[in-house]
Image (cartoon, grey):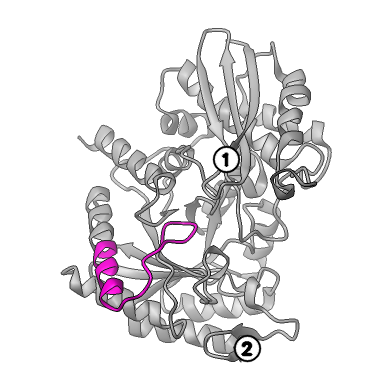
Amino acid sequence: MPKLKFLKAIEILDSRGNPTLQVTAELSDGSRATAAVPSGASTGSHEALELRDGGKRFLGRGVQQAVKNVNEKLAGRLLNKEIKDLKKTDKAMCELDGTANKAKLGANAILGVSLVLAKVLSVSEKKPLYQFLAEHYGFKPDFSKFPRPMFNVINGGLHADSGLSFQEFMLLPTQKDFPEAVRCGAEVFQNLLRLLKSRAASTLVGDEGGFAPKLRSNEEPMQLLAQAIVQAGYVLGKDMELGLDAASTQFLKPNGIYSLALEGKGLSAEQLVALYAEWHEKYHLHLVEDGLAEDDWGNWAMMTKTLGNLKMRVVGDDLFVTDVKRLKQGVEKKAANAILIKVNQIGTLSQTMAAIKYARQHKYQVVISHRSGETCDTTIADLAVAVNADYIKAGSLSRGERLAKYNRLLTIWSEENG
């Protein structure tokens, strides 16, 4: 087996202009690869710790210490050693950190190394990354079943200054042929652009490439998407369904009421779930992510039962933070029926794979997701194919760092389906 001969991190910028890490690795056989680490804006309180420097530099968001931890501590542990079992390597890095949330070395530092080692081993073995990941972690990809894209085309919450309480309004094409699903989404996106222009509404985009117009209510985006789908020549409910990332922790008040600022009213958990059910009937809302706050466990079970009876996907993001321990609680409490997977929430590729396997074992569907602070690294596209993910969420149909993931999936589709 080749040995790790070179490992170096540098500070680069993500899609929001904030610092993040890029890590390059080289093996003794000459194989070389680079990986970049994403960063979230709407982050769950239970996520692994993203190490930032503080101080004045980059308004406190620099990652020089995380870079130093890669170049000195992690490199000191891994250089000149054979890298053949990524689970053992990830475990060794976590043990070196010694904290439950990777606070000492930083989840961003550890993840950068975890990702780049997988990529460089795939180069060494002359295999596409998705094939290497599937084989290394014991998955069997079904190339006739690609993940269903979730296009975030209207941004709100912490991703834009639109005033919307809900964070993401998404298009979910129904086509099983992935290139056709992308085409369908892109055509609706362009018709949404025309629709907004016709109303003299802003067509500037938010962090994830979706439009961020100032609207009158949290329901208006659903109405706009329904109209854009028709204008594009598609049928809502047949060719396209809708999805919603509520990110509801962000608008939960201390009294347990969920506040919708545009409407000037607050809703109980039961009323908010009833609203989702109403939108399911009116707008074919198929999926709700983080429909309730991250620690509202009792009401999550109620929501899952109510919306699950409508055959809706109830996705836990901040609820689970890609952590098997949190997911086990969800299984026990019957909270959610799908999990959002973000590699930087937990901080290693191996722990990410463990969460996916546990979800599969308990019949939870899997959504592979980007972060709002992204790079052009396309690892999550390969990951989605490797684990037969049910959905992939990589943002809207604009901005290069978002399209890089969808374009990578189109490339894989072409390679595997001719």
Query: Which secondary structure, mark 1?
Result: strand
Q: Is residue 198 magenta?
A: yes
Residue extent of the magenta highlight: 188-210
Residue of label 1: 13
Residue 259's quadrant in the figure?
Answer: bottom right
Work out whether 105 lies above or below 29.
below
Closer to the camera: disc 2 or disc 1? 1
Taking depth in this image into account, of 309 and 103 the one nearest to the observer is 103
Work out whether 243 lies above or below 52.
below
Work out whether 82 lies above or below 257.
above
- Marks counted in the figure total 2
Residue of label 2: 268
Residue 354's quadrant in the figure?
Answer: top right
Closer to the chain start, of discs 2 and 1, is: 1
Q: Can residue 92 be seen?
A: no
Q: Is residue 244 magenta?
A: no
Mark 2: few/some/many CA within 10 Å (<14, 14-19, 20+):
some
Taking depth in this image into account, of 45 and 301 the one nearest to the observer is 45
Query: Which secondary structure, mark 2?
Result: loop
